[in-house]
Image (cartoon, rainbow, N blue to C red):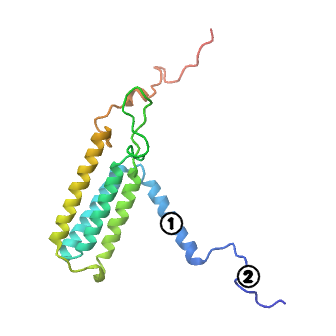
Amino acid sequence: IHGPSNPLMMESSEEPAGVAKLLAAQRVVRRWLDYTVVWIRTRWVLLALTLVAYTVRVFMKKGFYVVTYGLGIYLLNLIINFLSPAIDPDTEGGLPTTESGEYRPFTRKLPEFKFWVSALRAVVACFIMTFFEVFDLPVFWPILLAYFFILLILTMKDRVKHMIKHKYVPFTFGKQTYGDLTKMKPPAGGQPRAKEDK
């Protein structure tokens, strides 16, 4: 009865080595991504440089136009979600239209950080795909380029009409801020004074 036990019958609380390593790698990547949350300009410069490197690679290889088209469509989809409100006013009520109601800030369907992460992953994945000739499909690229610009114009036109119809702006420039009013200034002595009892 002390023979080898059936591995299917054994209850193991440990994960397989491959899964454990994958989870550990995901935790490391997540930790490094969390460090970048506050570095907004640096993150976007990194994305721009990665996109430039990808563009140079495609230009030098003179191929991978289908991959580039797919990347363009994916980035366009991310942009549309970034510019869209989280709650669609056409289906689930409306955005505030008067100033007398409670102030609700514009909440995006796709937050800025998730937009950046998704875009960077897509560009890096497409960059890696350019090292494999199987993804270099023969295609007449001017048709793809024209079709992409038609989609870009139509979707942006639709998004601008939606913004005008519901009177919202998904950007923060030009909006009133209260930066100086919200900062606490210590008294002249440097130490906050306690309230005097009367």
- Say above or below: 86 vs 60: above
Q: Nearer the viewer, residue 144 or 90?
A: 90
Displayed quadrant of residue 5: bottom right
Q: Is residue 30 left or right of residue 89?
A: right
Could you tell me the amino acid type at mark 2? Met
What element does badge 1 sit on? helix
Residue 13 is situated, as x and y percent measured from the top left of the image, at: 69, 72
Is 148 rendered above or below residue 100? below
Q: Residues within 10 Å of mark 1 (few under 14, many from 20)?
A: few
Which disc, if any, is residue 9?
2
Q: Position of residue 182 (x, y in %)?
A: 43, 29
Q: Provide residue 145's location: percent of width, then percent of height.
A: 18, 66
Q: Nearer the viewer, mark 1 or mark 2?
A: 2
Left or right: residue 188 versus residue 43 is right
Q: CA distance from mark 1 to mark 2?
A: 30 Å
Residue 194 sits in quarter: top right
Residue shown at the point (20%, 77%) measured from the top left:
139
Picture coordinates of residue 107, whole percent (x, y): 41, 44
Who's the residue at 18% across and 74% down the image?
Answer: 60
Residue highlighted by disc 1: 26
Residue 102 in view: yes
Q: Which residue sits at x=18%, y=72%? A: 59
